[in-house]
Image: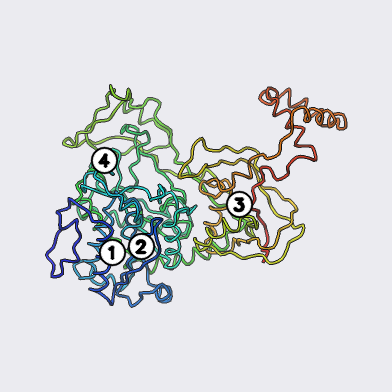
Amino acid sequence: MLRLMANDSLLTIAERSGYRQTGRIDEVEALCREFAQTWPDAVRSLDYGRSAEGRILRALLVSRSGALTAADIRAQNVPLLMIQGGIHPGESDGKDAGFIALRELLDGAASAGALERIAILFVPAFNTDGHERFGRWNRPNQNGPEETGWRTTAQNLNLNRDYAKADAPEMRSMLRLVDLWDPLVCADLHVTDGADFEPDVSIQVEPVNQGEPSLWASGVELRDALIARLAEQGSLPLAFYPDLAKTDDPSSGFALTVYSPRFSTGYFPQRNRFTVLVETHSWKSYAKRVQVMRNTTVDLAELVAARGPKWLELTRLADVASAKLGGSEVALDYTSAWREPTKAGGSTAERDAVPDARMIDFRGYAYTRTLSAISGDRVTVYDPQVPQVWHVPLRDRADASLLVKAPRGGYIVPVSLVTEIGPRLGAHGIALRPMQDRKEGITVEAFRANHVKFSAASFEGRMRAVLEGAWSEETLSILPGALFVPIAQPLARLVVALIEPQAPDSFAAWGFFNAYFEQKEQMEPYVAEQIAKELLAKNLDLSTEFAHKLKHDAEFANSPSARLEFFLRRHVSWDTRYNLYPVLRTEMSLV
């Protein structure tokens, strides 16, 4: 892959070292500077924010279309391809391959004329702080380079779990960059580990299973065309992420994951834009992986140059459709239709009988699964010298597991949450309208939880919550300063995904509102007993209802606290805000 160049300052450390090494952030800064100086008419080096430790977040804008600003790109309808590298710095293929691909596009060695029709926004090292936590064993199950960065940020956050909640300063800067430049296609470049097999790259594209249905056919078109090009270039590409249905057991086959908006692959479909999850395979050599990633980047540039204008028009129509989403059902979570085989590792006939799966021939390697004296569990050992076709199930049908009807008007964020939630919604580019006047006694929808399950441990620094309950009409007053979030906007799908309390990556699911589901005022049992007696004496129907529940609900009958709460919920002292989700819905526009 290494080519002799008149200006060898444009070569990466990976190339110079024969793909034994990858560079540090100072190399990223130097290369971005060299690119901008070498091609001043086609390259802009952008500083789009700071990391938690104060490092520059750097991007390159590359185009020969004459449009080198976000305003020009929008005005001239130039399709923009975003290449995101280094969200997980140990997976450095995308960074090195991105610089190589852009250099070849700029000097004419690849895809002559493509840059005249498109623009490319390249983020070489999204997680700059993690990139600088350099070490030899940061990616122990990966074949090179010798040293890499660390997976998480300085705040120990995984950025590819942060697109929705936007806790990290790096993510908030990224979201502002995305909202400003509005890429048509975002390719997120990774390296997968897990099983060992022959395929060297996997491609998963959305919208294909989620998002605006009118874009699905184009998502399939993009995926299939990219896979075909990679196959022609000598790769063995997969059309799905090779995630084993049962960890470390190749006989269990593979299961499709429809990613939620915490991931890049689930986030961009909510914006009505295309996303490509690219995963080279960790056990291939670093030189091979960078070559495949370079090919993928150049192929994407060619595809966007050829088909981008059509896709751009379709996304604009999808924006219009999203602005009319009010009153429609929106899918917010998915499940792949599969069950594990009754006997893991059983006979081929038993595996063939797995429901809701299709059998595929997969190019793997011979392997054994033996009981380990160390772990006491079965462990898989692969022999990459012996190719073997695995006849295994693939569960690749996605079914919506959560459907919610979007409100016709929008959502109301109360004054008490404006400083916490408002900036996060704003970072996404979501339209917000401050409410100037007090709204007295208006009809809204409120969500009241009847059961809340908090996570047993923190995840990404937050105690997650799963809410069960329902929306119902209530008459409430709204204080001035609240935010109205209209559903009539292009980012309506993202609005619903972030605000509906039962969505997997809503603010509620991430634990932003946990305090609202904690009971703050409680009554001593002896007082509750007296209240219960008074209520029973005054209300014969209540007595009948209590007796019926005792008879037919054993869990209730055996719980003293639940029996007392039955009466306390019907007393005037009960906290009417307990388990009340603080964000409201409205069927009409309020501003």
The residue under label 4 is which amino acid type?
A: Pro
Give the residue drawn at x 38%, y 61%. 185
Local SS, label 3: strand
Q: Dot 3: few (<14), some (14–19), or many (≥20) neighbours within 10 Å?
A: some
The residue where tag 1 is placed is: 29
Mark 2–mark 1 contact, CB under 8 Å?
A: yes
Disc number placed over residue 56 in the picture, else none: 2
Which numbered disc flags the more N-terminal residue, 1 or 3? Answer: 1
As drawn, is 51 to the left or to the right of 165? left
Q: CA distance from mark 4 to mark 3?
A: 45 Å
The residue under label 2 is which amino acid type?
A: Ile
Q: CA distance from mark 2 to mark 4?
A: 28 Å
Local SS, label 2: strand
Which numbered disc flags the more N-terminal residue, 2 or 4? Answer: 2
Q: CA distance from mark 2 to mark 1?
A: 9 Å
As drawn, is 247 to the left or to the right of 285? right
Q: CA distance from mark 1 to mark 3?
A: 47 Å
Which numbered disc flags the more N-terminal residue, 2 or 3? Answer: 2
The residue where tag 4 is placed is: 140
Q: Position of residue 10 (x, y in %)?
A: 20, 66
